[in-house]
């Protein structure tokens, strides 16, 4: 839709509200579709791949707008309104065709692994292409050439027959009454409730009994998840200790990185790095994209048997480091390095979070449960943005400005220098450190469930080999 400059604030608010609701619906449908259409061994790969391309949408729209009309903001808004609908309509027949088959999962793990590896290599090349050429200022003819190259890269997965997953997925979706089996001995297994007693017995080994005898062991073991993949209703979810640890890790981790990216323009201006803003935005976007791709590393390299919650904790490590670094030294190179670390960390968490939600709280309930989880994003944006605004205003000076179009005289607060965000960086560093601590506790509490799932999957694999 076209937004003229004389639109009222209320109308702009309603447009943003509708856009925000549509994004939530679109993301939820995509997540549920991936979970229901792919087997357990490939589900996480499909999720992280789709979320990774989500991070490239802005660069693709920019190429399209530069080719059509580079100096018209209305074109960019029009593309945002038309392209998602058009792509969804084009994708719908293929989705419905996949779900019309009656076959069950056909196991071809090696073949699927090669296909997904190829798709990730292609995604990496596409990301490099869009990041490099998307920042160029080109003529109209050159812009069309760049756009054509991007469209070819985006279309390649559809013209490679080997990339079709329809022949290997359970097209009717997962059966809630049946176990969610896992084909790979090194990858966590989603265990059904029928095996809960068996899993509980396997987890109660002497070392854990000894740990539960002390105070720390009682706290760490109380109410923790016994199995992976157990379905959690919304009521059960909010009463689960592990969920709130997970919520805190996200709230004090990826959400802080998102708020940082939203304030990056003002941060660059305050530190007299306004000329580097385009480069900083490109660094954050590209690192966020590659961080999302890196979230598939445990699934592509399946000998890495670390629990997914452990990878989540590892991904949070760079974020407090980056904020402490920018708190101590605020110059151009430090800002670039910190932005890159925050982009990698937050991108990894964004992509891995859906898989973690599915494994910990059940794949059939992920649509509801993950939306409950991401309620932390608007709450965190409000809180962390308010912290930054308070520090900025406290160190700024009021200036009188005149709107050249309307002639209205207004006052605004402008802050220049390291004092504008120094305290904010320190507070954000402490908050992200809390998120890291929460993720470590979550990893310790869920490690036994992941180990049990991996052991059971290994036993099943050995039994199949021997038989």
Image (cartoon, helix red, strand yellow):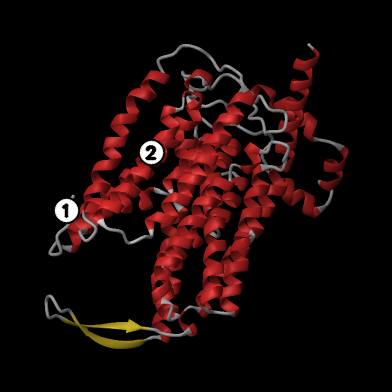
Residue 398 in the image: x percent, y percent? 31, 87
| Sequence-first tag of 1 and 2 | 1
Residue 81, located in which quarter of the rendered image?
Answer: top left
Residue drawn at the location 52% of the way across and 52% of the way down: 347
What residue does disc 1 label? 2
Residue 268 in the image: x percent, y percent? 43, 75
Position of residue 232 relative to residue 263, above or below, is above
Residue 63 relative to residue 461: left or right: left
Q: Which of 59/182 is in front?
A: 59
1 and 2 marks in contact (CB < 8 Å): no
What residue does disc 2 label? 152
Q: CA distance from mark 1 to mark 2?
A: 29 Å
- How crowded is the residue under tag 1: few (<14 C-alpha within 10 Å), some, or many (20+)? few
Q: Which mark is residue 438?
A: none
- How crowded is the residue under tag 2: few (<14 C-alpha within 10 Å), some, or many (20+)? few
User: Which one is closest to the eye, mark 1 or mark 2?
Assistant: 2
Residue drawn at the location 41% of the way across and 57% of the way down: 378
Residue 296 in the image: x percent, y percent? 59, 42
Residue drawn at the location 21% of the way across and 49% of the way down: 78
């Amino acid at each position: 839709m076209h937004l003229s400059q004389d639109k009222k604030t209320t109308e702009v608010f309603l447009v943003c509200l509708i856009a925000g609701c549509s994004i939530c619906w679109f993301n939820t449908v995509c997540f549920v579709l991936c979970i229901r259409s792919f087997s357990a061994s490939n589900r996480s790969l499909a999720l992280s791949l789709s979320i990774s391309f989500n991070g490239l949408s802005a660069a693709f729209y920019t190429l399209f707008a530069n080719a059509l009309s580079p100096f018209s903001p209305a074109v960019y808004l029009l593309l945002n309104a038309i392209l998602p609908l058009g792509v969804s309509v084009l994708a719908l027949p293929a989705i419905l065709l996949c779900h019309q088959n009656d076959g069950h999962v056909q196991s071809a793990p090696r073949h699927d692994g090669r296909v997904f590896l190829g798709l990730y290599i292609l995604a990496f090349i596409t990301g490099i292409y869009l990041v490099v050429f998307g920042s160029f200022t080109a003529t109209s003819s050159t812009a069309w050439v760049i756009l054509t190259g991007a469209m070819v890269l985006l279309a390649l997965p559809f013209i490679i027959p080997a990339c079709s997953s329809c022949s290997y997925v359970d097209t009717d979706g997962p059966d809630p009454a049946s176990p969610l089996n896992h084909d790979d001995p090194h990858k966590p297994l989603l265990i059904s409730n029928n095996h809960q007693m068996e899993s509980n017995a396997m987890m109660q080994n002497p070392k854990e009994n000894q740990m539960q005898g002390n105070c720390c062991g009682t706290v760490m073991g109380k109410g923790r998840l016994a199995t992976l993949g157990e379905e959690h209703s919304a009521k059960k979810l909010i009463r689960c200790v592990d969920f709130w640890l997970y919520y805190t890790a996200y709230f004090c981790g990826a959400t802080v990185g998102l708020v940082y990216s939203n304030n990056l323009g003002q941060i660059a201006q305050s530190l007299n790095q306004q000329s580097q803003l385009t480069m900083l935005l490109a660094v954050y976007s590209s690192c966020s994209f590659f961080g999302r791709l890196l979230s598939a590393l445990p699934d592509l390299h399946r000998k890495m048997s670390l629990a997914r919650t452990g990878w989540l904790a590892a991904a949070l490590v760079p974020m407090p480091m980056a904020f402490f670094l920018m708190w101590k030294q605020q110059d151009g190179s430090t800002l670039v390095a910190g932005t890159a670390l925050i982009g990698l960390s937050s991108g990894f968490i964004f992509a891995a979070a859906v898989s973690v939600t599915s494994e910990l709280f059940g794949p059939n309930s992920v649509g509801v449960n993950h939306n409950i989880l991401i309620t932390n994003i608007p709450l965190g944006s409000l809180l962390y943005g308010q912290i930054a605004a308070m520090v900025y205003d406290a160190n700024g000076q009021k200036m009188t400005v005149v709107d050249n179009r309307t002639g209205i005289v207004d006052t605004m607060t402008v802050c220049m220098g390291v004092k504008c965000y120094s305290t904010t960086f320190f507070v954000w560093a402490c908050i992200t450190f809390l998120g890291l601590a929460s993720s470590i506790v979550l990893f310790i509490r869920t490690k036994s469930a992941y180990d049990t799932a991996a052991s059971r999957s290994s036993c099943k694999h050995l039994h199949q080999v021997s038989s």
